[in-house]
Image (cartoon, rainbow, N blue to C red):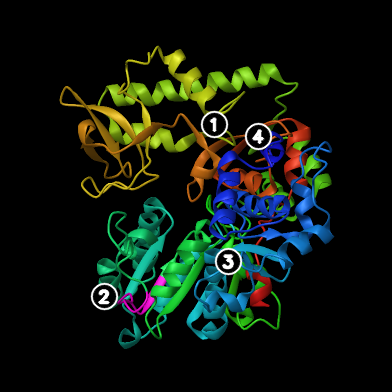
């Protein structure tokens, strides 16, 4: 069995998990294939899949030298001969539960199967309590929410909660929703309800405490006390958290899911919003009539190169993408990183000049200007390490600014909060600038209109973001986004990754990457293995 680890099919931890399961189950006989199936299922879960598709086990094979690789007949035999390990859906209700469940040709960790089945059952049985609002960046999803709430009579306004996968996204939803409601002349009652509504991560909404048992206060019979929960950026909501959220909804409580199913999914297992969108697209689905799809673009003009490129990437039209790449415009520039080194060098100088301008404003204590400048340009890279990864960009910029490793809190340093912090009211994803104030250095966050400062000693975990990953840019927008795609052989180069990056700018997009890597991304529509879509049809 060590051959699977040596070949990189699974990790040592995956295989150790398999050994532990086999030991606890007192499994005997030829168990090599059983161990592989267990380890692969655990590996698939780590990679973001809800399950292992049994008919696709061969796709995990990394080398033809693995002579012990099981055939489909041997896979089925291994499962049939070890029912104490691989149970059926009905066996989930039994005690003890089997550690794994096989359903419709998919192998699940039992807990994951139970969560997926619960979500599907809830959505199917309670479709009238669910609204699904889908649309790309700038299509007016929050405006739709504001308009729909405004249409309610004061007596119908529900007790409301807003949540999102990140604190930044949740807070931004509140701010934009408040602005939309005020501009539309919403009633004072609705504005008051919004003012008192929580706007936080799903973890906080469910009162998560890692050192408490149970870790979530709201679960089982303990239900949330809200009539309506609105989830923004729902594409980033993992399967497990969606399960906990719907499980905590009170009887007759409504759930609105708002997001873009074409963006990157959660870093954890599942692709819940995309699964729901595809399942609900079937006319036979009870959710079919509960979907609102917004398509009119408001962030950038529908005839702009950015809009055309985003649409071409979203539908996977490689030929159209190539034509757009080769037709530069005022709002779009493509730099082939394998050939146009002079252009890449010029771009690097532009990024450094921008960082220097931010630093100059910060040194003068002009936090408003520093924050405004920061929002005007942002480098987004698909990777952290390697050529043109975010570490490369951050180091290059800091070297050019003359900053050494000992100067951690230099003036003009752009920082992103990486953990929620109740004491400072800062959320994971908040971006700020280190600026001068009364002879000291402080972190400034928020809008340029009303920036607020926090002592550096009180700041939670932060990282430098002259460049940041495309994953962490979800839910954000910039005047000019520089999107960097790595070499084509990178496993993370996908259509969703590219689409998410190129839809961040409001005015200008610079795309850096070889033609090969970009077209590879367009053609690689990576779908996570789940069963939720089929359960909702």
Residue 494 - label:
none
Residue at which label 1 appears: 384
- Label located before the other in sequence (4 or 1): 1
Evaluate if marks 4 and 1 touch, with contact meaning CB atoms under 8 Å apart: no
Give the magenta part as a residue range.
220-229
Side of 181 where 11 appears, left or right? right
At numbered mark 1, what does the secondary structure look like: helix, strand or loop? loop
- Label located before the other in sequence (2 or 3): 3
- Label located before the other in sequence (2 or 1): 2
Q: Residues within 10 Å of mark 2 (few under 14, many from 20)?
A: few
Q: Residues within 10 Å of mark 3 (few under 14, many from 20)?
A: many
Residue at which label 3 appears: 134
Going by the picture, which residue comes out furthest to the left? 438
Camera-side residue of 80 and 149: 80
- Rounded to the nearest angstrom, the CA distance separating label 4 from label 2 is 47 Å
Horizontal and vertical percent position of residue 207: 30, 63
Query: Given this view, does label 2 or label 3 mark the residue nearer the observer?
Result: 3
Side of 477 where 201 appears, left or right? left
């Amino acid at each position: 069995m060590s051959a699977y680890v040596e070949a990189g099919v699974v990790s040592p931890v995956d295989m150790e998990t398999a050994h532990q399961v086999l030991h606890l189950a007192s499994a005997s006989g030829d168990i090599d294939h059983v161990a592989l199936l267990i380890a692969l299922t655990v590996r698939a879960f780590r990679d973001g899949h809800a399950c292992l598709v049994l008919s696709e086990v061969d796709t995990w094979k990394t080398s033809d030298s693995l002579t012990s690789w099981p055939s489909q007949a041997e896979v089925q035999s291994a499962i049939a001969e070890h029912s104490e390990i691989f149970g059926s859906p009905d066996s989930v209700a039994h005690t003890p539960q089997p550690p794994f469940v096989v359903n419709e040709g998919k192998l699940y960790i039992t807990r994951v199967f139970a969560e997926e089945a619960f979500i599907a059952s809830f959505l199917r049985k309670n479709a009238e309590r669910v609204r699904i609002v889908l649309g790309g960046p700038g299509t007016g999803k929050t405006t739709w929410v504001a308009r729909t709430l405004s249409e309610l009579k004061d007596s119908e306004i529900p007790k409301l909660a807003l949540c999102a996968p990140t604190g930044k996204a949740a807070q931004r939803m509140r701010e934009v929703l408040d602005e939309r409601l005020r501009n539309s002349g919403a009633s004072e009652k609705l504005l008051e309800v919004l003012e008192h509504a929580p706007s936080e991560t799903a973890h906080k909404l469910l009162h998560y405490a890692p050192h408490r048992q149970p870790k979530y206060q709201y679960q089982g019979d303990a239900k949330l006390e809200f009539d309506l929960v609105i989830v923004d950026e729902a594409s980033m909501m993992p399967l497990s958290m969606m399960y906990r959220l719907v499980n905590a909804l009170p009887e007759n409580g409504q759930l609105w899911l708002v997001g873009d199913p074409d963006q990157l999914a959660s870093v954890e297992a599942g692709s819940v919003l995309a699964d729901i969108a595809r399942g609900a697209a079937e006319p036979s689905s009870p959710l079919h009539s509960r979907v609102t799809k917004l398509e009119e673009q408001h962030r950038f003009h529908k005839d702009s190169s950015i809009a055309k490129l985003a649409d071409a990437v979203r539908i996977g039209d490689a030929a159209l993408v190539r034509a757009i790449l080769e037709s530069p415009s005022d709002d779009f520039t493509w730099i082939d990183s394998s050939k146009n080194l002079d252009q890449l060098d010029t771009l690097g100088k532009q990024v450094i000049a921008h960082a220097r301008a931010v630093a100059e404003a910060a040194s003068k204590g002009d936090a408003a200007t520093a924050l405004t400048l920061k929002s005007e340009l942002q480098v987004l890279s698909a990777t952290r390490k390697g050529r043109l990864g975010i570490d490369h960009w951050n180091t290059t910029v800091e070297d050019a600014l003359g900053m050494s490793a000992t100067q951690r809190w230099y003036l003009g340093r752009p920082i992103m909060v990486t953990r929620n912090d109740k004491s400072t009211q800062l959320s994971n994803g908040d971006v700020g600038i280190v600026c001068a104030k009364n002879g000291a250095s402080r972190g400034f966050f928020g809008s340029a209109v009303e920036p607020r400062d926090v002592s550096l000693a009180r700041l939670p975990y932060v990282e430098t973001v002259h460049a940041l990953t495309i994953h962490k840019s979800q839910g954000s927008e910039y005047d000019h986004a520089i999107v960097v795609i790595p070499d084509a052989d990178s496993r993370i180069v996908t259509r969703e990754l590219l689409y998410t990056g190129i839809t961040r700018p409001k005015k200008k997009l610079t795309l850096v990457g070889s033609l090969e890597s970009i077209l590879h991304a367009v053609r690689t529509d990576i779908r996570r293995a789940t069963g939720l879509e089929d359960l909702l049809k």
